[in-house]
Structure formats: structure tokens, C-alpha cells
Image: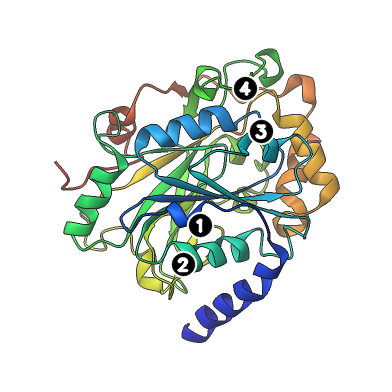
Amino acid sequence: MRLRRKYRLVRSARKSLELKVFQDRTAQIKPNDILLISTMRNEKIRLPHFLDYYRSLGVDHFLFVDNDSTDGTLDYIAGMPDVSAWHTTASYKASKFGVDWVNWLARKYADGHWMLVVDPDELFVYPFCDTRSVRALTDWLENSNIRSFSAMLLDMYPKGRISEQPYVAGQDPLQIASWFDSGNYTIARNHQYGNLWIQGGPRARTFFADNPYKAPALNKVPLVKWSKRYAYVDSTHMMLPRGLNLVYDEWGGEKASGVLLHTKFLDTFTQKAKEELERRQHYGASIEYRAYAAAKDDELDLWCKWSEKYINWRQLEILGLMSKGNWA
């Protein structure tokens, strides 16, 4: 495992040569700042709300990798004092789906910082997030000697066909995609890395009903007190050293955890799915996007009679999808 971790770090250094600086504000990063890293392509429409959301939680600086966007993403973030950005035309797939770029930026800029790694369609929810900043969470984690914090990816979707409700820039996507599956999930332990492997939700029942074991993984470790010795292995699903993946209580109790509200399923989804299928830059020969493309654009409706409408984090805790553990 040490060799695997070293390989990841060496690989990330080599892949860093693919990144070209667009805007470097990293000199402004203070020792106690909370950082956020995100890799994106053509997500300009999401950025106004994304930035507002995470700024309101207390993120101090954003580190973005733009993978050859054509929608004006870089023009939009230009001049923002709390955003540093890099541009690349290199292969997302050949960078281990962006993991190499994330590992490099984290190693160079996030050593000693609490760091979030999220996609532009993910909204981080944690216990007391309606009244406490993410710094309150990281302070508690630090005082509890906890280095990593898990969050289950929860697919959000609208009621009715996703093409019927247009999304506009700056809008809270939860105004449209406000429903989720509350119970159809499976959990297994990955004995090699020690992490939990979660599958299920609307993608499993709609796109992978005949082969649910091929459904996307929903387990993530998006918040970490970073060290230059650390490395993500597969997206934010698992890390090295393996101890960072032990984000659950092996003795039957509960550790604090959160949720990433995944707002992929807006009216922008079908066009983006077609684009990504053509690019073939995603995991498993783009099996996930081939499943999406097989759905009829004008009929895609993920809502069902068991769908639950999102209210707040306390609702998710009652349903067992997250926990405040012993944080009071």
C-alpha cells in the first residue's frame, strides 16, 4: 500500500505538467484557510450557486481545474479573488478521471489544511449545517483527532420528467431536484482499502435495474485534513493511507457523517450525458453514460411513489443516511 501511495504521488507530479495556470491567487491562502478543489468541464451555469453555497459554508479558497470548457467557465471566474484556476486540454480519463490533478493540487497547496473535494453538482450537507459553518465541523473533528469525514452521495431529482423544468444560472438546483430515494441502498466493505461501498438510489433502479452491481458507487470521503503524504485512489471513494477510509464505527456505534446532495438530474443532464458519451472519458468505457444515453430524453422521470422530498439534514439523519455521531 505504501508503494501504491508513492506511485499515486509520483504520477500526480508527472500529470501536473498538463495543467496550465489561468489564475493563481494561492499566495493569498492563509495557514488556517479551508480549501475546496473541484475538476469541471462546461459547468458555468452551476457556478454562481455553487460558489455562493460554499462561500456561505465558510470555504476560504477555491482551486479549480477546467478541463477544456467551451462555455465561458474561465471567463466567468476571472478576477475572483478567492479562486485559483488551471486549464488543461489533456485527457480526463488518462488522469485517472481527474484524480491525478486533484492529488497534485492538494499536495502543493493543501498540506495542513482542511480540504473539500466536490464536483460542481454536489452540495455538501453535514450535521448542524443550517446553523454552524464548516469550520465548526473541522474544529470539532480536529479536537476529536479525526482526519477524514465521509458523506454519502444522494441523487436528487425532480418530480416528473427532468426536461420539463428548465434550470437557470444562479438558481438553487434543489428548487427543482428536491426528491430522493430514502431506502434502496446496499452497503459492503472493501477489504482491500477498508472503505464502505454503497450502491443504490434512482440510478441503480432506473439505469442498472438488470445489473445493480454495476451501479455507481455512492460512498465518498470529501473532507480531509490534508497531508502531502495522502492520495485519493479512485475519485473521492477511497484514499491512501487506508486509515482515512475508516469513517464508520466498526463496533456498531455511529460516527458523524454527512451527505453530498447530487444535483446531476436537471434539464441540462441529457445533453451533457450525450457529450460525455461521445468523449468517452469516464470510468468503465463510459458504462454509466451509455446507460443514460439509452433512456429516452423526453421521457426520463426518476420519481416514484416511494420518493421522499428533501427538507433538511435532520430528515436525512432520521432516515439513517447521515449521522451527527457524538457531535452535539
The quarter holding residue 295 reads: top right
Question: Vertical placement of 237 versus 136: above or below?
Answer: below
Q: Nearer the viewer, residue 180 or 204?
A: 180
- What residue sits 36% from the left and 59% below the top? 113
Distance between mark 1 and mark 4 Cα atoms: 27 Å
Name the kind of residue labelled 2 in the image.
Answer: Met
Task: Kindly identify which residue carries mark 4.
Answer: 169
Q: Secondary structure at mark 4?
A: loop
- What residue sits 51% from the left and 22% below the top? 172
Q: Secondary structure at mark 2?
A: strand
Name the kind of residue labelled 4 in the image.
Answer: Ala
Name, please, the residue furthest toward the bottom.
3
User: For mark 3, does the 10 Å Cα neighbourhood hold few (<14), some (14 to 19), or many (20 or more) residues?
Assistant: many
Q: Secondary structure at mark 1?
A: loop
Question: Vertical placement of 52 versus 222: above or below?
Answer: above
Q: Nearer the viewer, mark 1 or mark 3?
A: 3
Distance between mark 2 and mark 4 Cα atoms: 33 Å
The quarter holding residue 102 reads: bottom right
Question: Residue 81's x, y, as percent?
Answer: 50, 41
First in sequence, mark 4 or 3: give its number: 3
- The answer to whether the residue labelled 1 contacts the one labelled 4, judged by CB atoms less than 8 Å apart, is no
Task: Kindly identify which residue carries mark 2.
Answer: 239
Question: Residue 318's x, y, as percent?
Answer: 27, 32
Say whether residue 221 is left or right of residue 146.
Answer: right
- The answer to whether the residue labelled 1 contacts the one labelled 2, judged by CB atoms less than 8 Å apart, is yes
Name the kind of residue labelled 3 in the image.
Answer: Lys
Please indicate, yes or no, whether residue 254 appears anywhere in the rendered image. Answer: no
Task: Kindly identify which residue carries mark 3.
Answer: 44
Q: Secondary structure at mark 3?
A: loop
- The answer to whether the residue labelled 4 contacts the one labelled 3, judged by CB atoms less than 8 Å apart, is yes
Distance between mark 1 and mark 2 Cα atoms: 7 Å
First in sequence, mark 1 or 3: give its number: 3
